[in-house]
Image (cartoon, rainbow, N blue to C red):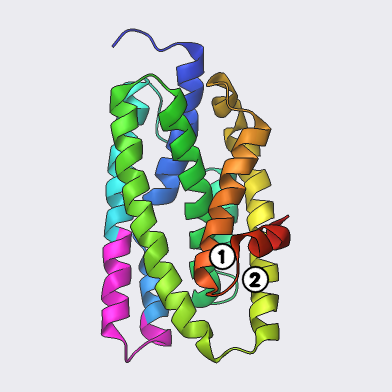
Amino acid sequence: MPAAPAGYRELARSLSHFQLGESGEGTYLLREAERAHPDDPAYREALSLFIREEKEHARLLQKLVERYQGRLVKKHWTHSLFRLVRRAFGIRFEIQVLVIAELIGTAYYRLVAERLPDEVVRQVCELVLRDEAQHLGFHVDRLSMDQKAWLPVEQALWQGQFQILFLGALQVAWIDHGAALRTLGITYAEFQREARCECIRFLASLTPGLSREETAVRVA
């Protein structure tokens, strides 16, 4: 295709950072899962399939980066920060950081698919969104099962720290991807609203009996 406009080159840079995040082998996660859940091979197999789909996303994102004449990156400060944080406190914490990344990614891909007049990009975003919805459902099932024995105060503390981490990650995501989103006419307020709605839906599905309005108050 002809030389990509400046806005598309900015989008290629943004997509390359998502591609980097999706391209890991999952070695650390699978090792921690084997250590923490030695008697649950079904869960470990599900995590392996999850990682395999993430790698397929990385392959598709690579094609989009190349489509807009961008270049893949081998490292970036946001990726390094993400890896450092998610490995800080064991597998449960790593899973919740991965969930937060998927919530924010879902908002990103949906907005890009809506605003960018490119059928190829729309199809890739829709495929990724379909997979991410399934991933989030998988994590909801597991987290709900893990938290069945928790006291209400323990659940409230978990939700509080999850939301704090989510809001911090959301600010980092805008710092990294805001320039690309602005080229598509997507404002900071729109990105925030879309991502926060994803978080609200996730927390509401994780906590049976908690209304979406009550969860929205907690996120706000």
Amino acid type for the residue under numbered disc 1: Leu
Residue at image location 32% in from the left, 62% down from the top: 50
Q: What residue did someone put label 2 on?
A: 159
Element under label 1? Answer: helix
Residue 60 lies in quadrant: top left
Q: Is residue 122 left or right of residue 136?
A: left
Answer yes or no: is residue 24 visible.
no
Q: Residues within 10 Å of mark 1 (few under 14, many from 20)?
A: many
Residue 17: mark: none
- Magenta stretch, main secondary structure, is helix
Foreground residue among 26 and 212:
212
Q: Which residues are magenta?
A: 34-51
Vertical placement of 5 versus 128: above or below?
above
Q: Going 28% across and 11% down the picture, which residue do you hit? A: 1
Q: Quadrant of residue 37?
A: bottom left
The one nearer the camera, 146 or 193, is: 193
Percent position (x, y) of residue 220? 73, 55
Residue 36 falls within the magenta-colored stretch: yes
Q: Is residue 36 visible?
A: yes
